[in-house]
Image (cartoon, coloured by chain):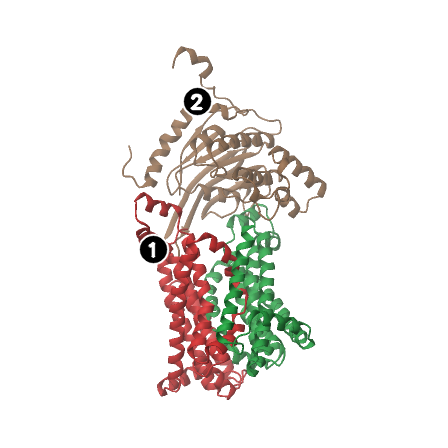
Chain colours: A green, B red, C brown
Amino acid sequence: MKQTFDPLIVAVVIVACWQVLHLTVGDGSLSSPWSTLTELVHMLGTHAFWSNASETAKALGLALIIALAGGILLGVLLGVNRMSGVVAEPILLNLYSLPKVTLYPLVLLVFGLGLSAKVAFGVMHGLIPILMFTMNAIRQMRPVYLRASRTMRLPLHRTILHVVLPAVFPEIVSGLRLGFSLTLLGVLIGEMFASQRGLGYMLTSAMNLGDIRTIMAVALFLTLFALLCNGLLLMANRRLQHG
Amino acid sequence: MKTENILRAAVVISFIALIEVLCRLGVIPASVLLAPSTMVTHGVELLRAGKFNHDIGISLLEIVTASIVSVLLGFVAGLSIHALPRMRRALEPLLSSYYAVPTFIFYPVFIVVLGVGPLPIIAIAVLLAVVTMITATLDGLDRIPRALHKSGLVMRLPAWRSAFFIKLPAALPYLFTGVKLAVAYSFIGVIASEFILSGSGVGYAIGYAYNNFQNDDMYSLMLLILITVTLVNMLLNRIDHRFQSRRQR
Amino acid sequence: MTAANTSLNRPAPLRVPDTLPSQTPGEAHATLTGVMRHFTKNGSKELFHALGPIDLTLTKGEFFSVVGPSGCGKSTLLEALAGLSEPSSGTVMFEGRPVKGVPDGVGVVFQEDASFPWLNVRDNISFGLRMAGMDGAEIKRRTDYALGFMGLKDFAGAYPAQLSGGMRQRVCIARTLVTQPRLILLDEPFGALDQQTRLLMGDELLRLWRETSATVLLITHALDEAAMLSDRVGVMSARPGLFIDIVETGWNRSRDSRIVSTPRFGEVNARLWEKLRVESMKVMGAGSAH
């Protein structure tokens, strides 16, 4: 009981701080929790919101599929060979810590504006964590599993399919959790200045109009969506934990 | 020299060489990407002429400030949360789902509240980096083996001595991982914020150059960031390596 | 020795182990001839002499243990015999054929827990058979038998994470058992278990050995375990490992853990330690031993 109660208290505290901040800086700078909520509910009833949301969802879905497939494939390839994993890791870490915004102009020049650029941004952000989690999971997989499959004389493809992938599956889901958030971030940022559609675009245009209510309502929606997906993946992760 | 370092250098160099060749041959048009050699020569010119020195200075200031603030704040917060298990359990969902939320969506809010200038940028960068430092601090304190803690008790050390002479050194490798990540996130936070909405800084300069079709300035600045990040990472990794050898396995 | 315990505690006369009808006593089942293993140290050209030269012949159906100080290459020997690694020189033969890769009819139980955490006990045990494409009814038959034999019937649906270390090792042994191996190799299988569990697992291993009539090679660091379980015990020197003694125990095939209370057991143990002590001290870095 206490376990679910305490985080709720934290949530209440956050909302309370929000309210205090609103009272301090005024309605023009920060909407109150209540007005944000009502604005969101109102927004959810508009066609405009949902057409934007579906744009974002489309880009997100595509980007996730590519990031997941590419990340797992490359992760397996780099992780299986000991040397390639060792060589690749610092390069990948470096790319990961690079402010990807520095590559945005390049992406825009290659993909132009629109859906493909957004998907490219998403993949750019999400691929590397999935790749790294998969790669490290394979590198850290207990070697005794491979030896056991050798003593059972399994051919390579069966070893990968029936031993390696099940063994690293929980880590892949962990990588997916991080990759999901980053892909969402990438897609949103892409929409913020490379698209005329989508929730990111809604944010930017609201920003240009000084429409703080819309900004916060969209931000609230995205926060709740992200937390929901993260929570689901976390639950999946816990269920898969082999102990 | 270790085989893996040679291989790594070979991979990077051949990649750069490939891009260089493709650019020179015109396979990659100059309107899309400049040849790496051009980026370097133009970059050197820019630095010498001091065209972007002001922007570079501002960005550096913001990054360093954000790093220091997030590391200190994160460490202190982590320390306090670790000492209060009930608070920790309450904050657990928040900490583990923090990075699920695209923090940038709050950037417009920060601008509205704090105005334009370095302050909202530093704020967003700290917001991005602080939680990873908190997590790393908690992790580091968790991993101090019970045996070390008990040794302190057996030696009858007072609490602060135990903390300073036993716990801190024991947790240091993990804390440093947090520092590495905090610096990386500060970098990302600052540059990205400048790019999206700012009037100064390297991120802004890149965006400005892009909008004005000044590819040469743009790419040289991008290269500058790439090189800086790489060098900072190498430095931090070297220090981290010294810590790693002390880690419990 | 007092008069009272002469008849009960007289060392068992040396006997030829009970043979089963299908076996030819004394037939060589697996051999290692001049086997040596060298490793190169990370990056440098320096050769690290890990094992050998080893000459060993395992007769069909015997139980052979290997003891030795840490780092002497016991596991390397097992890997060479199993076909998991190739020796730098020398030959390994199994059933008259050179070993290249893991031969059919060889089962290995590892030191670490090799049970797959994502499968339950039953699926773990039947894994090898399913991968080999065996007929479903036969798989069920063999798996049920192994579950019963290893005392895992009540845990067939449980997952390894829910089991103790000893139970998990039983799962690994069961997984080997269902493939009906003719040579069973065990690399310190009970290392992680407590003493009492180890003694009982030793009894189980003897039961398994008798039941399957397989040849068994056991690697262990526990002298008493080797002394109790084996027909012969090979004592290895410190690195590079060589056999410095092979002790015949002369036990009956029908033995169990109760032989630990016999004087013969004490003698075997003493003889093993006599040779091993010197080698172990070398590993510990002590100076000259006497």
Q: Residue at x 63, y 79 (%)?
A: A197
Q: Is residue B176 above or below residue A35?
A: above
- Say which chain tag 2 marks: C
As displayed, is residue A133 above or below residue C290? below
According to the image, label 1 marks what residue? B169
On the question of residue C53 being in view, the answer is yes
Q: Residue tagged by mark 2?
A: C264
Between A141 and B248, the one lying in front of the other is B248
What residue occupies the far top of the structure in this picture?
A: C3
Q: Left of B200 or right of it: where is C26? A: right
User: Quick one: label 1, few (<14), some, or many (20+) residues within 10 Å?
Assistant: some
Circle 2 residues within 10 Å: few <14, some 14–19, many ≥20? many
Judge depth for marks 1 and 2 and give the one in front.
1
Q: Amino acid at mark 1?
A: Pro
- Split into 4 quadrants, where in the image is the N terminus of chain B? bottom left
- Regarding residue B35, the answer to whether it shows in the image is no
Residue B140 on image: x %, y %: 41, 55
Instruction: Judge if badges 1 and 2 mark residues of a common chain.
Output: no
Residue at x 39% of width, y 28% of height = C271
Q: Is B66 on the left or on the right of C159, as rendered?
A: left
Residue C222 coordinates in the image, percent (x, y): 43, 34
- Please state the chain letter of the residue tagged with numbered disc 1 in the rendered image: B
Quadrant for residue C138, please give it: top right
Distance in Å between CA atoms under marks 1 and 2: 54 Å
| Quarter location, residue A160 | bottom right
Say which amino acid is labelled 2: Arg
In the rendered image, the residue lying farthest to the front is A23
| Residue C125 higher or lower than C260, as above or below | below
The kind of secondary structure element at disc 1 is helix
Residue C92: give x, y in percent of width and height.
Answer: 50, 42
In the image shown, does B46 or C74 lie closer to the viewer? B46
